[in-house]
Image (tube, grey):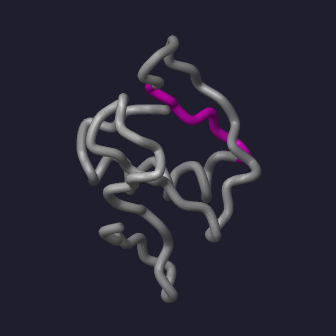
Amino acid sequence: MERFPSLQAAKDALWSRTYMGYSQRQHFDYVFRRPERVLTPAVTEGSYIDLYRSPDADLSLIERRILFGLRGGIRIEPC
């Protein structure tokens, strides 16, 4: 699980990992381990980021999902 300082940071991370992740290392600020910078070539426009209220939340209780919309923009859906 990783943490984001804001919803905008999570949206930016999804966009960057999709369009730049094959050539530039992406930052992952993990909750329970050290941060890393890795390549993310497998992240596509079909990928998404699930957000939870806290690091110890029940993983079946997704609060929001960040994903690409039909016209290429990034949207946030409540779950």
Q: Position of residue 49 (x, y in %)?
A: 49, 54
Query: Is 7 placed above or below 47 here?
Result: above
Q: Which of the pair 45/65 is nearer the observer?
A: 65
Identify which residue is drawn at 58% across, 49% down.
17
Q: Name the quadrant containing residue 24.
A: top right
Q: Quadrant of the C terminus?
A: bottom left
* Residue 74, placed above or below residue 26: below
Q: Position of residue 39 (x, y in %)?
A: 70, 36
Magenta-drawn stretch, dominant element (helix, strand or loop): loop
Q: Is residue 26 left or right of residue 64?
A: right
Identify the magenta region.
22-29
Q: Nearer the viewer, residue 46 or 12?
A: 46
- Left/right placement of residue 72 relative to residue 54 reads right
Marks counted in the figure total 0
Q: Is residue 54 above or below residue 45?
A: above
Left or right of 58 on screen, residue 7: left
Residue sitting at x 34%, y 60%:
64
Image coords of residue 13 (percent x, y):
45, 47
62 or 38: which is nearer to us?
Answer: 62
Instruction: Say which residue appears at 59% left-offset and 25% top-offset.
Output: 37
Query: Most extreme residue toward the top, as rendered?
Result: 34
Residue drawn at x 69%, y 43% as measured from the top left: 40
Q: Residue furthest bottom?
A: 71
Image spot of residue 62 (x, y percent): 39, 55
| 3 inside magenta stretch | no
Horizontal arrangement in the rendering, residue 19 relative to residue 52 (left or right): right
